[in-house]
Image: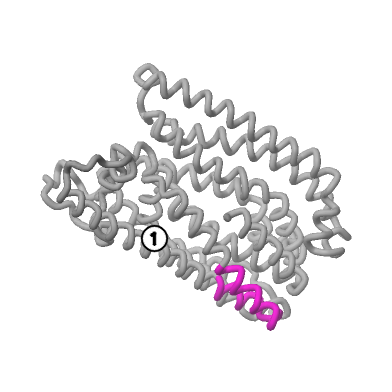
């Protein structure tokens, strides 16, 4: 289903390119989405990586309190970067768009809204609600696309306005979806537990045992709160070990974000390319990273969670479970083989079919310039990024706090 909807949005994006100028594409997909990427990554990525480490050892009340720190952090980053995007960077001319300011603030608002479901999101990841994540990610993309596309068909000159509306509405749908799901899930779970207590002789299934292990009894458990019935000195509001680990990931995350989005920061901060050229670059980059989004990113997310559960952080290898270590090394080896094979296939076929793909996607405007050459070079980077992604997952999932700080 996820691949099907991705294909639908891919076709709709190709349709959009024929109604929106490359300059506007550069404003939306480079300038504004870089703002979103920066705010979201710095606000939540470190918390996600830290709190997904050895989830079986967590005191979830402390974890929830820690995760809610992402909301004020996101608000601070939104104000800081929103100000930079509006008053420090060179804004696009009114000939390109008259809604740039609205676009910046809509990105900031959508990021803050999305951060409201961060505790629920992480719980869903920790307790393996895999289907929920796939469904809600797909719904968010579909809502965003099906709001944006009709609006720009009727008013192409208001593309940034349509983009802003789509961002805010899709973020609201995403957050509401998580809370509605867990409201229904917890309600049904509590009803099942009450029925089982009346008939204790009935053996429990594996699914029922997993439901019994779920530590949340109502939606209010996802809100920050004092940890009652505990000695404060022994059980502080947050887990300091996780907080230190989060700080280590945050320091690494700043550098990683700069390296990951380095070319976009250069284009944005130093205006080395026009918005038209930035739009061309973005189209090529999106096409070239299709494999990364469809295949590599889900594999990397699953691999990070797997390795973080199999290997104990801050423990020397001699004290690790040797069976788990052997299994982890074997999984890492097989993943690298699979990823490298996929990357080589993309590299080989990308050299011959780059021009055709760009023509089918965006018409003659994409093949008249340096687009095909950029596409061929991007196929090589996909191979390198694929291998780097898996090895980075293993490293970040197993390194000690001291190693992360180096």
Q: Is residue 152 magenta?
A: yes
Query: From the viewer's perspective, is residue 232 above or below residue 110?
Result: above
Foreground pick, 309 / 397? 309
Q: Is residue 96 left or right of residue 259?
A: right
Query: From the viewer's perspective, is residue 211 above or below residue 143?
Result: above
Percent coordinates x, y for residue 132 in the rendering: 45, 54
Report the magenta stretch's main SS.
Answer: helix
Q: Which residue is mark 1?
A: 117
Foreground pick, 99 / 122? 122
**Residue at horizontal 64%, vertical 39%?**
386
Quarter residue 403 falls in: top left
Quarter residue 4 falls in: bottom right
Q: Is residue 239 visible?
A: no
Circle 1 — which element? loop
Q: Residue furthest bottom?
A: 154
State which quarter of the image contains the N terminus.
bottom right
Magenta-colored span? 143-166
Q: How many marks?
A: 1
- Tell me which colouring the rendered structure shows: one colour
């Amino acid at each position: 289903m996820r691949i099907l909807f991705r294909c639908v949005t891919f076709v709709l994006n190709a349709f959009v390119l024929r109604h929106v100028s490359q300059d506007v594409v550069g404003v939306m997909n480079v300038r504004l989405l870089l703002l979103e990427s920066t705010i979201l990554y710095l606000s939540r990525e470190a918390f996600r990586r830290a709190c997904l480490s050895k989830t079986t050892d967590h005191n979830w009340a402390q974890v929830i309190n820690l995760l809610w720190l992402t909301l004020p952090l996101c608000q601070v980053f939104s104000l800081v970067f929103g100000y930079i995007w509006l008053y420090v960077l060179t804004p696009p001319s009114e000939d390109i768009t008259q809604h740039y300011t609205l676009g910046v603030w809509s990105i900031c608002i959508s990021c803050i809204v999305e951060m409201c479901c961060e505790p629920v999101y992480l719980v869903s990841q920790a307790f393996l609600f895999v289907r929920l994540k796939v469904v809600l990610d797909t719904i968010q993309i579909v809502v965003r696309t099906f709001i944006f596309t009709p609006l720009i068909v009727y008013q192409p000159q208001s593309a940034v306005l349509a983009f802003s509306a789509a961002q805010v509405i899709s973020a609201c749908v995403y957050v509401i979806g998580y809370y509605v799901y867990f409201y229904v899930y917890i309600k049904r779970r509590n009803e099942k537990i009450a029925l089982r207590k009346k008939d204790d002789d009935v053996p429990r299934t594996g699914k029922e045992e997993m439901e019994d292990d779920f530590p949340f009894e109502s939606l209010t458990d996802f809100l920050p709160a004092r940890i009652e019935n505990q000695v404060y000195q022994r059980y502080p509001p947050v887990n300091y070990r996780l907080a230190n680990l989060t700080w280590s990931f945050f320091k690494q995350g700043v550098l990683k974000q700069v390296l990951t989005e380095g070319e976009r920061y250069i284009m944005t901060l130093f205006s080395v390319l026009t918005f038209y050229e930035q739009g061309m670059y973005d189209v090529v980059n999106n096409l070239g990273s299709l494999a990364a989004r469809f295949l590599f990113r889900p594999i990397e997310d699953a691999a990070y969670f797997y390795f973080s559960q199999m290997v104990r952080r801050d423990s020397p290898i001699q004290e690790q479970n040797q069976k788990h270590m052997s299994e982890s090394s074997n999984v890492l080896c097989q993943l690298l083989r699979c990823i490298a094979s996929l990357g080589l296939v993309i590299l080989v076929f990308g050299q011959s079919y780059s021009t055709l793909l760009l023509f089918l996607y965006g018409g003659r405007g994409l093949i008249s310039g340096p687009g095909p050459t950029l596409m061929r070079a991007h196929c090589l980077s996909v191979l390198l990024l694929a291998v780097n992604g898996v090895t980075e997952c293993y490293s970040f999932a197993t390194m000690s706090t001291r190693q992360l700080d180096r």
